[in-house]
Image: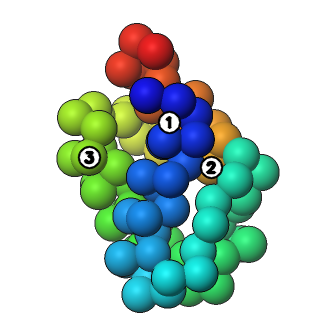
């Protein structure tokens, strides 16, 4: 799975959560960059990501993610990619 595959999957998850088909996530995207991506949607997003990729993040990880790129790196590390 490439980085782009992961970004595409994360974008799709957030599109569904926010009901916004225009969402496209990049390595530099932050929650502040996406209208409606509040703290509740962030928790729902993380739960959906964990389910999609069959991984579990530590709470410290979830609190430390500043960009979508950092989430992608954490996914790759847990998947052994």
Q: Are marks 1 and 3 in contact (CB under 8 Å)?
A: no
- Asked whether, in this view, residue 34 is left or right of residue 44, the answer is right
Could you say which quadrant of the image residue 34 lies in? bottom right
| Secondary structure type for disc 1 | helix
Q: Of the two numbered discs 1 and 3 on the same chain, state the one appearing first in sequence.
A: 3
Residue 76: give x, y in percent of width and height: 48, 24
Residue projecting furthest to the right: 28
Disc 3 and disc 2: Cα gap in Å?
Answer: 16 Å
Residue 31: give x, y in percent of width and height: 64, 67
- Viewer-closest of 58 and 9: 9
Mark nearer the viewer, 1 or 2: 2
Q: Which residue is mark 3?
A: 52
Question: Which label sits on residue 61?
Answer: 1
Badge 2, how many Cα within 10 Å: few under 14, some, many 20+? Answer: some
- Asked whether, in this view, residue 67 is left or right of residue 7, the answer is right
Q: Of the two numbered discs 1 and 2 on the same chain, state the one appearing first in sequence.
A: 1
Check the image and report above or below for 36 versus 59. below
Q: Are marks 3 and 2 in contact (CB under 8 Å)?
A: no
> Where the N terminus falls, by quadrant?
top left
Residue 24: give x, y in percent of width and height: 62, 66
């Amino acid at each position: 799975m490439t980085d782009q595959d992961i970004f595409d999957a994360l974008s799709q998850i957030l599109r569904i959560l926010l009901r916004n088909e225009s969402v496209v996530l990049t390595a530099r995207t932050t929650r502040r960059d996406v209208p409606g991506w509040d703290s509740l949607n962030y928790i729902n997003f993380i739960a959906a990501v964990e389910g999609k990729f069959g991984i579990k993040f530590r709470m410290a990880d979830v609190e430390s993610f500043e960009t979508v790129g950092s989430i992608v790196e954490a996914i790759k590390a847990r998947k052994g990619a």
